[in-house]
Amino acid sequence: MQELIYGCMGLGGSWSDEPHGTDHVDEAAAAIEAALDAGITLFDHADIYRKGKSEAVFGEVLAATPGLRDRIRLQTKCGIRLGEKGIPGHYDLSRDAILERVGGSLARLQTDFVDVLLLHRPDPLTDLAEVADAVGQLMAEGKVRALGVSNMSGAQIEALQDRLEVPVVANQLEMSLLKRAWLESQVLVNHAESLDYSFPHGTLEYCARNGVTLQAYGALARGLYTGAAPEDPTSAETAAATLVAELAGKYGTSGEAVLLGWLMKHPAKIAPVIGTINPARIKACADAGRVAAALTRNEWYGLWVAARGSSIP
């Protein structure tokens, strides 16, 4: 399904162990309201975001707002461990870890189920049979209604799918006008420049062929082209930001909508994830679908070339 998704990673305050406060709950409530006003109904979480505080503040808003859970869909992720047992960070998709982490997420979110569970990162020690067993149990218990992945290649999804009795419905990847490896991989086959991009070729095609929705995190490029310019921008960044502003003026919309519309115009049917906590900026994204339909082929390619800083080979 091609839609806008609200990414909740910015909610909950700092990444420290300091507990969240009422101001963080109020901030979450304002972001959720802005997202709903923009037509967004899918909210993206992960157990590690703000060390669990993103889910916790969202859960407090849910508990305080009758009927809200029925109006939205929730997805969360598991599979990353941060700073545990003396290891700065590692991955864990063992059966027990999946069950434990999903239980923690449900408790923080104050809900009985999540609509989608994403496996956050590939774990080299993954036993796919264990993953399938954990997913089967969670679904049988009604705690998870669909399964997706994040940061996985088409080959990894295919190997996982072979063990599952349910389809993988989504793959969340970093995709934007700034992070274009997913796009470059489509045109750099048999070209030396392909070595500069690590994106696994064929992943977009696998997802499209198998009905796996592509979700794009970092879709707004951290504001690079819409106001948050670096102190010393490159000529490509300046050119792309200028073109984004020009197109926003032409179509009577925001720069954010242009960036998201550019992603959504791609035939892979990309669903952008919006990570800002600024209500005004969230609402500025609402027009993305209209922009996607309006952008011409020349304008779409023009943005790509401007961001590249060179012609497409």
Image: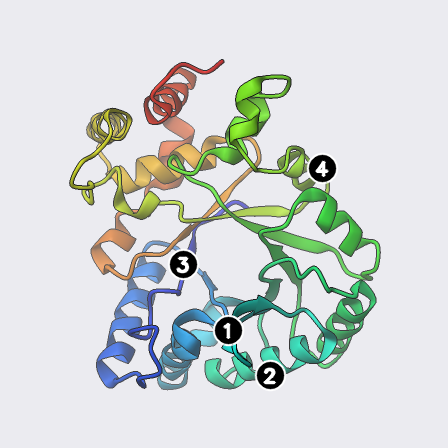
Which badge, 4 or 1, is on the more N-terminal residue?
1
Distance of label 2 from label 1 (alpha carbons) = 10 Å
What amino acid type is highlighted by mark number 3? Tyr
Relative horizontal placement of residue 157, taking residue 9 as reference (left or right): right
Q: In the current view of this chain or complex, which residue is farthest to the left?
A: 231
Q: Can residue 77 be seen here?
A: no
In percent of the image, x 39 and y 78: which residue is there? 53
Which residue is at the front of the view, 46 or 65?
46
Which residue is at the front of the view, 135 or 228?
228
What amino acid type is highlighted by mark number 4? Arg
Name the front one of labels 3 and 1.
Answer: 1
In percent of the image, x 38 and y 24: which residue is there? 308
Residue highlighted by disc 4? 209
Distance of label 4 from label 1 (alpha carbons) = 30 Å
Residue highlighted by disc 3? 6
* Vertical relation: 106 (above or below) 48: below
- Badge 3: few (under 14), some or many (20 or more) residues near its Cα, within 10 Å? many
Residue highlighted by disc 1? 47
Label 4: state its secondary structure: helix
Residue 5 at x, y = what percent? 44, 55
